[in-house]
Amino acid sequence: MDSRTDKSGDPAKTTRRSLLKAVGAGVSVTALGTTASTGQQSDYWTVVALPDTQVYAKDQTPYAKEQTEWIAENADTENIVFVSHEGDVVDHGDIDSEWQHMNKAMSKLDGVVPYATVTGNHDYAVLWDRDSSVAKYKEYFGPSRYDGRDWFGGAGPTNGDEGRDNLNTYQLFSAGGYDFLHLGLEWEPPGAVDDQSTSLGWGQSVLDQYPDRATILTTHSYLRDEPQRRTRELQEASKIGNTGQTVWEELVSPNDQLFMVLCGHWHEGTGESGGEAHQVSTNDAGSPVYELLANYQFRDHGGHGLLRRIEFRPGDGSDGSDAPDRIQVRTYSPSTGEEKTDSDSQFGFDLDFDDRFGSTAAETPEPTATPETPEGPTAMFQQGTDGYSGTTDTVIRAADPETSYGTDETLSIDGSSPEGSDSSTQALLRFDGIIGTDAGKIPPGSDVEQATVALETSDGGDGAAIHRLRTDWSADATWASLDGGVQTDGSEALSDAVAQTGAVETGETSIDVTASVQAWVSGARNDGWVFRPLGNDGWDIQSADSATPPVLTVSYTPSETLAGDADGDGDVDADDVTRLQRSVAGEDVDIDRDAADVDGDGDVDIGDAVAAENLAEGDR
């Protein structure tokens, strides 16, 4: 009989944390200010928070560069998996030299570790005024900075306002066998969670897109140090944002996956306690949320480069605690080598990682089930079957940006290709010529009951998030020709994924693409999908040039009115487009208004003409 027990008194068992502890056994953890020469990883993983760097930018001091150099040098030995800048990157948002100073510092992290920044009140051209320009922030730290980074999820919302669009971002990373989401929201994020055109609503849509990922939120102003509580009043001039308390009530507390909030900005306290606060709050589901404030700008020399090390330590729960694991927070300056040990700077929380972060990564995944096909007309499209030849697919690789893979028999989706690199590989897939009035096609305006893509998986892996594309491409496309890979920014591809496979096994993998096909049947342009990796274990599927090409199967109910058939002759062609364009221009032409109203909004306008043109081209 094995008499070993864990801290709860239960017989010892093999868990993710015990495996991690076993792997880490014998590995000496280096001192905070040193870099180990062995290259061995610690048995914990670390998220680093960078508090306001505005003083370093203003005074052009080396502290920010020394922070990021330390992170880069210790990324392996200290297992640093993510870095979050808490806002106020600079002191004067309209001064180029400050942005250039911080750009050099933050560039030390490129290709080393995933990271994010958020806007602070000093990052606008006019202090406290979000209506002033953020052009320099977006130039240096906007979404384009992260082109080609497989961990970068996207930015939003996008409403056509260049000054306000895409100030919020999200990132994906994994550590300890768990999958995490980081959500970065602008200073005092505006809007409501039910309005995706606003920052708060966009944030909620990202959480909805990744409901199984444990999430860290960073926003500049959220928790105060004195009095220690969430903010209750807005500071921004236009007063259109949300306080920390509102962000808690509307976004954080209702979403159980959000377990930590990081922020900066506040420094009302005096002495060594100024600019620091932490509290544990209980969300709507009864789970703890760890809220952490750090901001050292008003200490000598802006805190001499103090940063926050948030260590996730499996099996290190305190004696007497029912929770077996621990999050340990340390405050350290790479510039001086000093570690702050007061209770505001060094503290921790006991919790059960498997319980809070989910343990699905340790389980054997079930193959994706093939949905049942509804009754009614069905159209099937597969390269080389029944005369169909409209499938286009390819792979684009960051590691080989100029190379085309349009004739390869395998499509690979990978977050680390070649292995151990920070280079991503994406796959593109499109079925052309699927909509029309010819036999075997889907009639325009039909109600799509179900659409699935069946893929033959030749090598299982972490799978992909599939997004509907909104940019033109061909089989000769490359990483470079698509300007650094496809970004899910709402412009190149929709930010919301059509589907996420999770881990996949060899054999047939089916993906529900009903929403995409419905959009195309209703007149949207068909540019196909991009498959973006969900991890570093590559997923290989057979291409249209293989012996087992992808299959698109669509069940539908035809509409009584043929959408786009403005002249009523039973098909949708260039004549219908011309007639629609003339009608929109105000000419007196005879049209079937029900058929001409392709988008079904009750009006016949330029949008219907564009939709009809897409349909007239057979969706391509």
Image (spheres, rainbow, N blue to C red):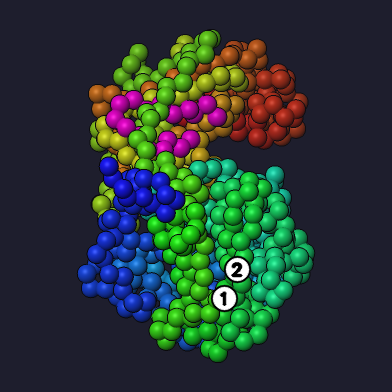
Q: Nearer the viewer, residue 398 or 388?
A: 398
From the viewer's side, name the closer residue of 404 and 536: 536
First to last magenta residue range: 499-515
Dot 2 amino acid type: His
Residue nearest the observer in this picture, 217 or 345: 345
Does residue 134 appear left or right of residue 537 in this picture? right
Residue 294 drawn above or below residue 259? below
x then y, percent, for residue 576: 61, 23
Q: Is residue 308 above or below residue 471?
A: below
Q: How many marks?
A: 2
Q: Is residue 500 magenta?
A: yes
Q: Is residue 527 visible?
A: no
* Position of 311 relative to 165 (above/below): below
- Which residue is denoted by mark 1 in the rendering? 344
Image x and y of residue 313, in percent: 41, 61
- Does residue 139 appear left or right of residue 366 in this picture? right
- Residue at 37 percent of width and 61 percent of height: 44
The answer to which quarter of the image holds residue 600 is top right
The residue identified by callout 2 is 278
As for residue 263 lying within the magenta part, the answer is no
Q: Which of 187/572 is in front?
A: 187
Residue 428 at x, y percent in the picture:
38, 38
Q: Are marks 2 and 1 in contact (CB under 8 Å)?
A: yes
| Quadrant of the rendering where the N terminus is positioned | top left
Mark 1 or mark 2, which is nearer the start of the sequence? Answer: 2
Q: Is residue 450 above or below residue 174?
A: above
Circle 1: residue type: Asp
Residue 218 position by quadrant: bottom right
The residue shown at (65%, 35%) is 607
Element type at mark 2? strand
Q: Secondary structure at mark 1?
A: loop
